[in-house]
Amino acid sequence: MYHVKTGSDKAILSFAEPFPDNQYITLPLQLKNKDFKVILDSGNAIGWMIHSRELKKLLNSENGGRAFVRIGRETGLLDGYQIYTDRIDFGEFSLRHLTGHYVPKPRPNYHDANLNPTMIRDRVVTLDFVSNRLILRSKEKFDEDLILLLSQHPENICRLPWYGYKQPYVPVIINDERNGLAMIETGAEDIALRLSFARKLQKALEPEVKYLVDGRELRYFKTPIKVSLGKFPFERKAADVWPFNRFYDWITGLGADVIIGPLALRGQMNLSFDPFDKKIVLSSVSF
């Protein structure tokens, strides 16, 4: 996993401006007076991906073997190759020893790089959707801050077990009646439900159509849903419903019944990945 270097036991970096569709959470990265944006994507099983040819060159990333990768809503497998990046300096902190893939941008307005924050295992990573910032803390500092918050706002904290290896899965309750497993996918959009799970719940499914970047039709469904992560409920009158064929952990055998995207958390939640205790901490108050 990726090694972090910081100047203190707590490093803070504000999110970059989101893309016009207000979908992605990104970090600003400046190299040689060039500005880049790195998406924070907890569903990225590869962990580190570069899409900008210029960024790859400035980072002096070394090439490995050829690789075929499926990304985002792009159709089919994209041609790229494995890479090794020795260091990325974000100013407040740096990351060392990143292995991953380079896949050229499938279209000009595609993002520059993609990083899975859950693969940082020597710090507690907090995505603060209330104050729009990334926080990296030592385990000792995180526990200290969490104890203080619990003493002041115990009702605003929820701790959940963190299942999964390269992606974060948590237990959820669907519609106050059925247990399920959710993947927290910060590279997705909003809340979505797996089609087979929706049919088990005998949900009313309204057919919908959207179009992929190559113009192909994508047929899916909509349905109302309530998803509870511990004490925090999230309700949608029309959540997306689709098969989730690609969201499966081949090491643990875990599969997602529900996807929780950043639009569900933005403006109201702090999301902390604690790799030391294998916990995911949700808080409606910044700390």
Image (spheres, helix red, strand yellow):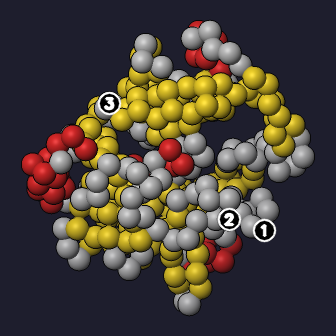
Residue at point 75%, 53% (across, down)? 79
The answer to whether one can see residue 237 in this image is yes
Q: Is residue 62 above or below residue 152?
A: below
Neighbour tally class for label 1: few under 14, some 14-19, many 20 plus, Cα within 10 Å: few
Q: Nearer the viewer, mark 3 or mark 1?
A: 3
Disc 2: CA contacts within 10 A as few (<14), some (14-19) or many (>=20): few
Q: Residue at x 65, y 31 (%)?
A: 238
Asked if the residue at tag 2 contacts the one at tag 1, i.e. Cβ–Cβ closer than 8 Å, the answer is no
Q: How far apart, in angstroms, are the residues tagged by discs 1 and 2?
A: 15 Å
Q: Is residue 175 left or right of residue 197?
A: left
Return the residue nearer the eye: 68 or 70. Answer: 70
- Disc 3: which residue: 230
Q: Position of residue 168 (x, y in %)?
A: 42, 38
Residue under the point 55% across and 89% down = 32
The one nearer the camera, 12 or 287, is 287
The answer for how far apart the CA atoms under marks 3 and 2 are is 32 Å
**Which is nearer the N-term, disc 1 or disc 2?**
2
- Mark 1 or 2: in front is 2
Residue at (76%, 28%) from the top-left corner?
220
Looking at the rendered structure, the kind of residue marked 1 is: Pro
Callout 2 amino acid = Pro
Residue 20: mark: 2
- Identify the mark at residue 108; answer none if there is no mark: 1
